[in-house]
Amino acid sequence: MLDLELLGESSWRGPGGKRKPPFFKRTWFRALVALGILGICVAFGVLVFVVQPLREKALTYDMEECKRLEEASVIYDRHGGELGRFYVMNRTRVELSEVPSHLIKALTAQEDSRFFEHDGVDYIGIARAIWLTIKVGRVTQGASTLTQQLARNTFELREKSVRRKLLEAFVAQELEKHYTKNEILELYLNRIFFGSGNGQQFYGIQAASRGYFGKDVKDINVEEAATIVGLIKAPNLYSPLRHVTASIKSRNMVFHRMMEEGHITVEEEQALSLKPMMTSIQTVDSRLTYVYDEATRQVKKLVGEERATTGGFKIYTSIDPDIQRAAEESVRKRLAEVESQKAFQEAVDSKGQPHQTYAQYRAILSDWRAKISSKEIDPKTPKPEAQYLQGSALVLDNKDGAVLGLVGGRDYIDSQLNRAFTSPFAKPRPVGTAFIPFNYAAAFSTPLFFPGTPLEDLPFDNSLVMIGAFQGRLGEWGVEAEKMSYTMGYISARESLVQGRNGTTMRLCYQAFQTDQDRLDYVPLTELVKKCGIESEILERPASFLGVSPAYLDEMTLAYTCFANNGTRPAQVHLINKITDAKDQVIFELDEEASAPVQAMDEIAAAQVNSCLVDALERGTGRAARANFGLKKFPAGGKTGTHDGFKDLWFLGYTSRVTCGVWVGFDKPKTIFTGAVSSQIALPIWSDIMNASIAGHPPEPFVKPQALGTIELCRKSGHRATDFCFTKVKDADGRERSVKDTFFEIARQGTVFNDFCTEHVGEGIALDLIAFSSPIGKNDIVGMAGASLPGIDPVRMQEDTVKGEDPYNSIKPAIRPADLRKEGSAVKRATKVEDDEGTGTQIPVRLPPPAPLKLLLAQ
């Protein structure tokens, strides 16, 4: 019989029959419950003290802030072309309808594939990101939606923390409640940063499209769209301008995501991935120009600096792009030619140092940068100062003073000093002989002077030498040329101005402005130039007649418009025509009344000076313009301006439509080189610019004032002509004949000039006009009315001998040999006298018979 051992039984209560406690009484369960309760408490605490406050904070954000975008202010030329952008953030707003569909597909595929499905937070994306992070052991992708990115960029939620991510999610959900999906897309594309290039940063899709590919966003293709989308994660790292390989890799990743989302096929992905990176040619930053600098300065002045920084303005300027381009190119080209001349290269300053050239400065700058990069010098070492020859140019519309072209220097990057405009940072420069026309205008404003006024062309003696050169050094007041020369006789005021005769100019000024007390009265001159627009002080010293007083280029250019406009000038120089805001509301518009022309100079005087300056360009100091520098044939006038010591060179000239001023010199005044005159250095620049102006501003003949009259002068003596002002010339066959040797000079009515020619005494006049011979048989010739003796000025009739009715129809003697009288009526000549019956029968002249001779015999 089997002996069985009785074993203890086991049950759920435990070994040995001892009952187990229920699971909810076990330690592990109690610990789990405790942890659960703790978790709930923590979760509740987080909800109450963290999540809820963040949710409430999200409600405090102004959702309309997304629409408030700081946009770039665009600067336009007179034809609507873009000149540049004035901004803190370079951005141009576009509507979603202008964005191509392939860009939207690329964006959503790469950044937020469930954008059109979620409520601002992609929970599936979050779960996937967490799983991949756990799987790989590092963060491989983010889970921020486009809406969250918009919230982050709008409200500057940049803190790297869970709290910030929660707040971002809550704000995104609020945005989804406030805007439609299309509105969120449009706000997103207009706001985010897309990198930078060529010194500019690109905010918004339009700025990126223009910056990288030179086209509007509506015109970009699929590979360009993918390139821009690929920039979002790391704009600088994936820049197609600086990191082409990285940019291609990022772009191709976008293609792959588009393929995964079904927007393109595998074949299309493969074909697109093989395409090279093509970007637009990068131009110089438009902000690095004098036009941009002056435009932004004026905008800040017009609308206020704080308001100007908000952006979104459209700034319409008066700049003519063709003139602007020609002016910039000419200043660079012509001054480089000057630097290549032997005389310039051999010139030295007062310390014996040769002049710096533009090319040499580029080498100095390159060496400075290299030493900073190699740490040979302190990175804080100041940039070397540009000391090369500078130039500036300004072109104005004669009608309204609009700036058509502006060059403030050779290179804005090297020097931001605008030498063309009045500025507290730029010093006025002596204008030299370019000031001389205003002396003549002041003198011609009276009946005592006109272009035919004779002036002595002789050197000044030492009675006009003054210590300090306030009045001129012996021989200084000569001609505007390297070598002095004189005619040693008389020349007209016209020839003095045309040929740049400084000595005769000084004599004119002494005659015109000297008082009875032998003092010079500068008031007529200073008042005139101020009315013409020159606000800089005119020093009251004789040297001011030759331009020792400094002025700015914009002042001088404005003043010269008086000569083209018969004494009127624009009220002001202006660059900005109109400013509108982002809603196209007009913020500023030029007041036409405020810019209406003002009469600054006597119209007759202006016309007289203009005629002289036209001659100066044709055959005087500016004749090289057409002879050497290619100035085309059109009506124009102008004047050279060379300051003493060849330090400041000017040329100012005009057509009927535009006036252009050019200045050349060093920022720190010094002799350019001995013999450097403006007709060889400044005039070529002026010629280039004026040639460029005629296409858009075709010149017309200058209009003379109706009140302008003429005086007939003798070419030989320069005095008023008589009936004897003939000269003998030989024809081709050798026969002599007499021709009139006179010309007509323009003058105002009532001009006081009664000096008649005494050089001609009957040469070429028929002998039957000789009245008498000497009663004692000598050959001395005395004249009848109008005849002359050499060197003796006879008494002349000043008025007609017959006044009012002339019943005998007598011959009225001509006060001057002309076909028309001063007032324009014809000079009357003798006519036949009719009989009483009006038959027209000629009445014979009956002479009584001579009296019989009586012979008286001496007793």
Image (cartoon, rainbow, N blue to C red):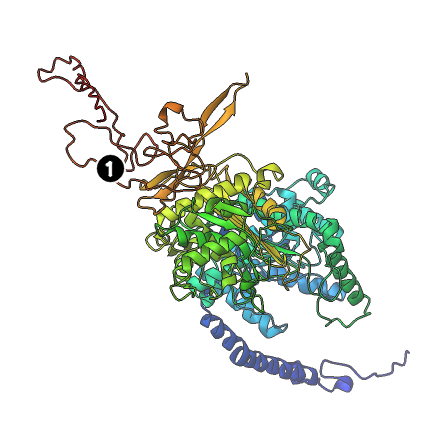
Q: Residues within 10 Å of mark 1 (few under 14, many from 20)?
A: few
Between residues 411 and 224, which one lies in front from this camera angle? 411
Residue 72 horizontal/vertical position (percent)? 51, 57
Residue 4 shows in this picture:
yes
The answer to whether one can see residue 428 in this image is: no
Nearer to us in this view, 685 or 514: 514
Looking at the rendered image, the quarter that the C terminus falls into is: top left
Occupied quadrant, residue 371: bottom right
Q: Is residue 552 above or below residue 479?
A: below
The residue depicted at 63 percent of the width and 82 percent of the height is 33
Mark 1: secondary structure:
loop
Taking the view exactly as shown, the residue that stands out farthest to the left is 837
Q: Nearer the viewer, residue 672 or 53?
A: 672
Task: Please state, as top left, top right, bottom left or bottom right, where the N terminus lies in the image.
Answer: bottom right
Compared with residue 120, is residue 398 higher up or lower down, i.e. above or below? Answer: above
Rendering coords of residue 145 (x, y %): 58, 60
User: For mark 1, what is the residue?
Assistant: 800
Counting from the top left corner in percent of width and height, residue 35 is at: 64, 82
- Residue 804 rendering spot, x and y as whole percentages: 16, 36
| Side of 563 relative to 368 (left or right) | left
Q: Residue furthest front?
A: 859
Q: Residue at x 46, y 68 (%)?
A: 306
Tell me how many marks there are.
1
- Direction from residue 307 to residue 276 in the image, left or right: right
Toward which corner of the image does residue 739 lie, by quadrant? top left
Q: Quadrant of residue 112?
A: bottom right
Q: In this picture, is 192 found above or below 776?
A: below
Q: Amino acid at mark 1?
A: Asp
Closer to the camera, 643 or 533? Answer: 643
